[in-house]
Amino acid sequence: MLPVLGLVAAAAASASTDPGGFAWKTATPAETGLRAAPLEALAERIRSDPEINIHSVLVVRHGKLVFEEYFRGTDEAWGEDLGQIQFNRNTLHDLRSVTKSVTSAVVGIAIAEGRIPGVDTSAFELFPAYADHLAPNKARLTLHHILTMSAGLDWFEPPDYANPGNDEIRMISSPDPVAFTLGRSFRTPPGEAFEYNGGLPTLLGYLLEEAYGQRGDELFSQKLFLPLGISDYEFHANANGLLAYASGLRLTPRAMAKLGLLYLQKGIWMGRQLLPEAWVASSLTPHLPSSWTPGYGYQWWIMKFTGEVGDVWVPAAIGNGHQRIFILEPQGMVVVVTAGHYNEARIKFDGIDMLIEHVFPAAGLNDMRFVPRDRH
């Protein structure tokens, strides 16, 4: 469980207000070529079993919202118990590590604007104020390694965030999360292996604040949220006041769907290239295998499914508690899931089950199976 250390940024507007001028177009599943029955069965399955504790499921196809269901369940906000909630389209929800994918998007914008140097830049150039924490061999550490979770730093972050030895919890509570992260010794050479590390998106957030001279909530709003018409959000902070770029965002499911649609549309939003197309491609490219998926991009997990139609690659933004943004590019779909399974390693019905048993069949893809990382 994450310690509750304070909410330092929040903005709100009425549900009808969309400062980006965007309004969702809606359609029935059939109007976009989907079968409705598997999706209807999904909603009934969730409602009939409280243990599933899924809070929302949204499906977007060809830019239209074709399925949007909200449910009742237990929830929390960054470790604070909220009890039973009846969710709706205006309810903010913890993103947890989906925040990492959002942070990566803003980094892509900053690089395109020349505020942050390219992905091959060394840590010595990126963090001059922390030179004392960078041993000479850390010259090999680059922004690319930070983005792909391949920094090679000695880091302990099990799924149990109640464990006091968890390095993300220690980082959150430390007086300087950047120093805490950069001061770790190498376990493996940078770029050699994936190692999940909540300190790395914290480094990204620090770079953004230094590059623009702004707090992250203001920067995210200016560069990403307002252009997308997202005006209602919250952003939690670490103990020293630095925003929690690894896990601190709270958004509505519709806002999550907009982020997924932005990537599906190769960074274009309402005719504007909001996110560089090359950054989207690099973000969703499997640069190396993760701990459990065949690929990991720039703070995006790259999942693989296979069946009679062949392989289907599904980039996913993934957060503790079972928060998900799935991008099914060949099918022109975005799937959003929010839930309340925080710190649970296994759950009764997860996003993979949902895709295989309901979403893929709705798109005419039957008998699909998940392909985990090949460890040979």
Image (tube, grey):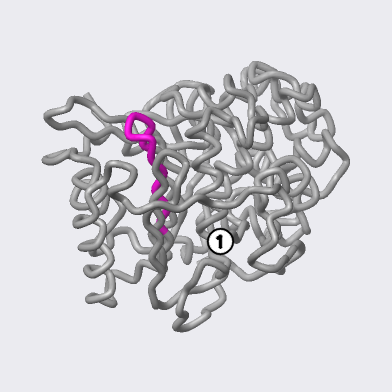
Magenta segment = 328-337
Viewed as shown, does residue 88 lie left or right of 138?
left
Is residue 9 left or right of 37 when viewed as pictured?
right
Looking at the picture, does residue 30 appear above or below residue 105?
A: below
Front one among 125 and 58:
58
The relative height of residue 109 versus residue 197 in the rendered view (above or below) is: above
Residue 65 seen anywhere in this rendered image of the structure: yes
Vertical order, 188 against 345 (above or below): above
Q: Is residue 131 magenta?
A: no
Residue at point 77%, 58% (across, down): 240
The residue to which callout 1 is attached is 252
- Badge 1 marks a residue whose secondary structure is loop
Which residue is rendered at x = 73% and y = 48% of the image? Answer: 226
Instruction: Judge the density around disc 1: few (<14), some (14-19), many (≥20) Cα neighbours within 10 Å.
Output: many
* Residue drawn at x 69%, y 48% as measured from the top left: 21
Q: Nearer the viewer, residue 277 or 170?
A: 277
Q: Position of residue 34 (x, y in %)?
A: 26, 45
Relative image position of residue 307 (x, y in whole percent): 14, 32
Instruction: State the quadrant of the C terminus.
Output: top left
Tell me, yes or no, if residue 152 can be seen here: no
Q: Residue furthest bottom?
A: 83
At label 1, the amino acid type is Thr
Q: Is residue 314 shown left or right of residue 121?
A: left
Residue 72 image-quadrant placement: bottom left
Image coordinates of residue 352 in percent, x first then y, are: 27, 48
Asked if residue 331 lies in the magenta stretch, the reply is yes
| Position of residue 263 measured from the top left corner of the image (x, y, whole percent) | 52, 34
Name the residue rendered at 32%, 38% in the picture.
Answer: 292
Using residue 313 as the reference point, say whether residue 44 is left or right of it: left
Label the magenta part by its dominant secondary structure.
Answer: strand
* Above-or-below relation of 195 to 347: above
